[in-house]
Amino acid sequence: MSQRVAIFPGSFDPFTIGHESVVRRSFTLFDHIIIAIGHNATKAGYFSIEKRIGWISSVFQDEPKVSVEKFTGLTVDLCKSKNANYILRGLRTSADFEYERAIAQINKAMYPEIESVFLLTMPEHTMVNSTIVRDIIRNGGDASKFVPRKMKIEF
């Protein structure tokens, strides 16, 4: 039987407790989860990709099902190269659903073997997003309650 490999793509700038929850809750669904930090042309990165890889790796250091890497290009091309048939995404709002649905349908048209799997965020994480957390950090606030405990971000 082949392994169920999922790609969890994003910019993760920074990785939040919502992201962590989605990954941990998907452990029963997948044999391996690759957290893939991509370059988003519409977003200017605040933290270096190397720093993000280090932080996320520390969060999942004791979890053999998870690996972290960076990538460029299309997510479906990464899926093909990693023999991953699933793309994992978290949904916070109905607007997230509409955006993710369109991407999932395009991905399916480009790579018919791919299935997008959406997990709803936990209600307590609905308001947490990387943009807001990044703004808190950028302005000297304490964002520690919005990022995983194992991430050592200087506040």
Image: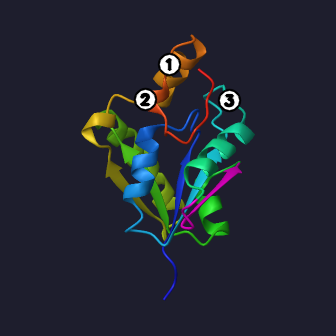
Instruction: Find disc 2 in the rendering and name its residue.
Output: 145
**Percent coordinates x, y for residue 146 in the rendering:** 44, 30
- Mark nearest the camera among 2 and 3 is 2
**As drawn, is 119 to the left or to the right of 45?**
left
For residue 70: magenta?
A: yes
- Between 61 and 26, which is closer to the camera in this rendering? 61
**Percent coordinates x, y for residue 97 in the rendering:** 33, 42
Q: Quadrant of residue 34?
A: bottom right
Question: For the residue carrying disc 3, how many other residues have a C-alpha within 10 Å: few (<14), some (14-19), or many (20+)?
Answer: few
What's the distance in space between the residues labelled 1 and 3, CA to CA? 16 Å
Relative to 138, is 145 above or below? Answer: below
Point out the stretch of residues depicted in magenta. 62-71
- Mark nearest the camera among 1 and 3 is 1
Q: Identify residue type, mark 2.
A: Lys
- Residue occupying the point 57% across, 10% down: 139
**Percent coordinates x, y for residue 98 in the rendering:** 34, 40
- Between 141 and 71, which is closer to the camera in this rendering? 141
User: Could you tell which of marks 1 and 3 lies nearer the N-terminus?
Assistant: 3
Q: Residue furthest bottom?
A: 1
